[in-house]
Image (tube, grey):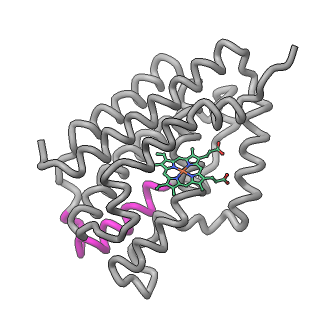
Amino acid sequence: MTTTSLSTSLREGTHDSHRLAEQTPFIRSLFQGQLSLEAYREFMLQLLHVYQALEDAHSQQRNHPLLGRLHFPALFRAEAIRRDLDYYFGGRGWQNLPLRAATAAYVQRIDALAREWPDGLVAHHYTRYLGDLSGGQAMKRVVAKMFNLSAGEGLAFYDFPQIADHAEFKEQYRALLDTLPVDAGAARRIVDEANLAFQLNRDVFAAMTKMPD
Ligand code: HEM
């Protein structure tokens, strides 16, 4: 009997979700360099709330048998996003801005998992950070060009100063996923959760092309 590794299950099991995310109007506009600065910075604000929830949960679960293995502060994005927001808003004016309902739902899901099924956070970790280390890097070039960020300011979100080789890190990450103590049933649930994570991301993208709630 052959068993599929968790990294392969995640990659294959979210293939369709990934394609749907790439095809959302918001992501397409971003890649076509057609977003306004207002839209982009509001998107970054949504991401801040998501990463803050995820990173708080991971920091609190440092000793958890699964999540502890994925505790990589070098991946954390919240602090970098705060720097970018300071740049785009010219100060701290973003701090009291409301988040969208879709973002609140995403944050609630992360918080619920932290309380009820921390193993499920593996799926959220995978979906965001492996994405940031992959397509996120192409996004950096688009954003730099779209907003003429020649000095590199406003791009901290895309930079992982402590990760020299992204491809190598991703390989190690996948290898690590495959050593987690996860049985076949739990692996299926984690893949389902990753598909939900993609859905929650798509909901945030969709909200960004609508008027505030
Ligand atoms: C147009 C937008 C996007 C492009 C061009 C893109 C591109 C890519 C590419 C080229 C890879 C493969 C990297 C590799 O094998 O080393 C990848 C992987 C990945 N992307 Fe995206 N991506 C996009 C959007 C997204 C979004 C919105 C998410 C999630 C919110 C995401 C999550 C992921 C994940 C989790 C992986 C890792 C797959 C794996 O190897 O298991 N991507 N992306």
- Tell whether 123 sits left or right of 86: right
Question: Where, by quadrant of the figure, is residue 58 drawn?
Answer: top right
Front-most of 176 and 162? 176
Asked if residue 150 can be seen in this view, the reply is yes
Front-most of 57 and 104? 104
Q: Residue at x 68, y 61 (%)?
A: 166
Q: Position of residue 36 (x, y in %)?
A: 23, 69
Q: Residue at x 30, y 31 (%)?
A: 105
- Tell whether 87 sits left or right of 167: left
Q: Position of residue 23 (x, y in %)?
A: 40, 49
Residue numbers of the magenta segment: 77-93
Q: Residue furthest right?
A: 1
Front-most of 180 and 195? 195
Q: Residue at x 61, y 68 (%)?
A: 161
Q: How many marks?
A: 0
183 up-or-down from 144: above or below? above
108 up-or-down from 176: above or below? above
**Magenta residue check for 101:** no
Q: Position of residue 70 (x, y in %)?
A: 66, 40
Q: Residue at x 77, y 29 (%)?
A: 5
